[in-house]
Amino acid sequence: MSTELNQAETALVESYRSLAKVLGEQRDQLAPFAERNAVKALAALWQVMNGLDQDPGQVYELGA
C-alpha cells in the first residue's frame, strides 16, 4: 500500500479483523440475531478494507 492509514482508518481495520476473528472462532457463542448482524457488519467492513487497499481476501467461509 502506498499511503499510511490515519487513526480512524486503522481503527476500522482493527474492527474488521476483530469481528472476523469472533465469527471465525466464537460464532457458536452468538445468539442468532447477533450472528446475522455481525455477518452483515463484516460484509460492510469488508468494503472498507477493500477501499483502503488492505486486501481483505474472501470471507465466504464466514457467511459474508
Image (spheres, helix red, strand yellow):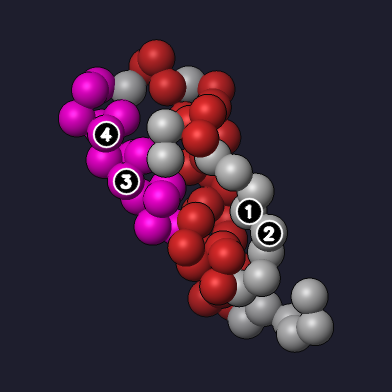
Quarter of the C terminus within the rendering:
top left
Q: CA distance from mark 2 to mark 3?
A: 19 Å
Q: Which residue is mark 3?
A: 40
Q: Residues within 10 Å of mark 1 (few under 14, many from 20)?
A: some
Callout 1 amino acid: Pro
| Depicted 62 relative to depicted 28: above or below | below
| Depicted 23 relative to depicted 44: above or below | above
| Tag 1 secondary structure | loop
Magenta highlight on residue 41: yes
Q: Are marks 4 and 3 in contact (CB under 8 Å)?
A: yes
Callout 3 amino acid: Lys
| Residue 56's disc number | 1
| Residue 13 visible in the displayed image | yes
| Residue 11 visible in the displayed image | no
Q: Residues within 10 Å of mark 4 (few under 14, many from 20)?
A: some
Q: Which residue is mark 2?
A: 55
Q: CA distance from mark 4 to mark 1?
A: 20 Å
Query: Quick one: label 2 or label 3, which is nearer the N terminus?
Result: 3
| Tag 2 secondary structure | loop
Of circles 4 and 2, which is in front? Answer: 2
In the rendering, at what x and y percent does residue 36 appear? 26, 34
Q: CA distance from mark 4 to mark 3?
A: 6 Å
Q: Residues within 10 Å of mark 3 (few under 14, many from 20)?
A: some
Q: Are marks 1 and 2 in contact (CB under 8 Å)?
A: yes
Specify start and end residues of the magenta stretch as a single range.
Answer: 31-45
In the rendering, at what x and y percent does residue 8 appear? 52, 76
